[in-house]
C-alpha cells in the first residue's frame, strides 16, 4: 500500500459504478483508464459499497472485483475523509451541470474527475 500524494487520485464509489456500467462520457473514461494505471486509490468503504451495490449483474460484479484488484486500498483515515468531503463539495457546486445516467438511475457530475482543487 502506497502513500497518497498530490498526484494521487482517490475514487468514490459512484464514479466506479458509472464506469463499470458504461455510463460515462468518453473523455471521463479516458481519464479513469489513465488514472487506473497509475497512483489511484479507494477507501475500504468504497470497496464495501462497490461490492455490495444491489444492481450488480454477474458481469458488473466480476468487473468490479477485477477493478478493485488494480486499485490501492487505503484504510479509513483523516486524509481519505478529507478527499471524500472535497468530492461531495464539488458535486454540490456543479449540480447544475449534472447528467442523468439512465442505467444507474442516478446523477453524475463529470467535473468531479477533472477538478484539481
Image (cartoon, grey):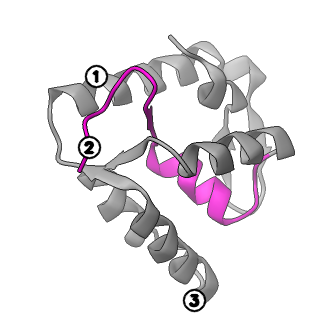
- Do the residues bearing badges 1 and 3 touch, measured as CB atoms within 8 Å? no
Q: How far, Cα to Cα, is label 3 from label 2? A: 31 Å
- Place of residue 108 in the rendered image (x, y in percent of width and height, measured from the top left): 67, 39
The residue positioned 65% from the left and 17% from the top of the image is 94
Which residue is disc 1 drawn over? 82
Q: Is residue 44 magenta?
A: no
Image quadrant assignment for residue 22: bottom right
Disc 1: CA contacts within 10 A as few (<14), some (14-19) or many (>=20): few
Q: How far, Cα to Cα, is label 1 from label 3? A: 33 Å
The residue positioned 41% from the left and 69% from the top of the image is 69
The residue positioned 25% from the left and 54% from the top of the image is 44
Task: Specify whether 16 is left or right of 96.
Answer: left
Task: Give above or below for 55 relative to 82.
Answer: below
Disc 3: CA contacts within 10 A as few (<14), some (14-19) or many (>=20): few
Foreground tag (3 vs 2): 2
- Do the residues bearing badges 3 and 2 touch, measured as CB atoms within 8 Å? no
Q: In this picture, which residue range is highlighted in magenta?
A: 1-24
The residue positioned 54% from the left and 18% from the top of the image is 90
Image quadrant assignment for residue 116: top right
In terms of sequence position, does the residue under pointer 1 or pointer 3 come before the other? 3
Res 25 label: none
Task: Specify whether 82 is left or right of 29.
Answer: left
Q: Secondary structure at mark 3?
A: helix
Instruction: Please indicate, yes or no, whether residue 20 appears anywhere in the rendered image.
Output: yes
Q: Secondary structure at mark 1?
A: helix
Task: Give above or below for 57 relative to 51.
Answer: below
- Place of residue 16 in the rendered image (x, y in percent of width and height, measured from the top left): 55, 54
Which residue is disc 2 drawn over? 2
Instruction: Please indicate, yes or no, whether residue 54 appears anywhere in the rendered image.
Output: no
Amino acid at each position: 500500500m502506497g502513500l497518497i500524494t498530490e498526484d494521487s487520485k482517490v475514487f468514490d464509489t459512484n464514479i466506479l459504478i458509472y464506469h463499470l456500467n458504461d455510463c460515462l462520457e468518453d473523455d471521463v473514461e479516458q481519464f479513469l483508464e489513465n488514472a487506473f494505471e497509475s497512483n489511484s486509490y479507494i477507501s475500504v468503504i468504497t470497496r464495501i459499497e462497490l461490492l455490495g451495490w444491489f444492481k450488480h449483474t454477474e458481469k458488473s460484479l466480476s468487473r468490479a472485483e477485477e477493478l478493485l484488484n488494480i486499485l490501492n486500498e487505503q484504510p479509513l483515515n483523516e486524509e481519505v475523509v478529507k478527499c471524500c468531503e472535497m468530492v461531495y463539495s464539488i458535486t454540490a457546486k456543479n449540480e447544475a451541470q449534472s447528467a442523468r445516467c439512465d442505467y444507474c438511475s442516478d446523477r453524475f457530475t463529470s467535473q468531479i474527475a477533472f477538478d484539481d482543487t
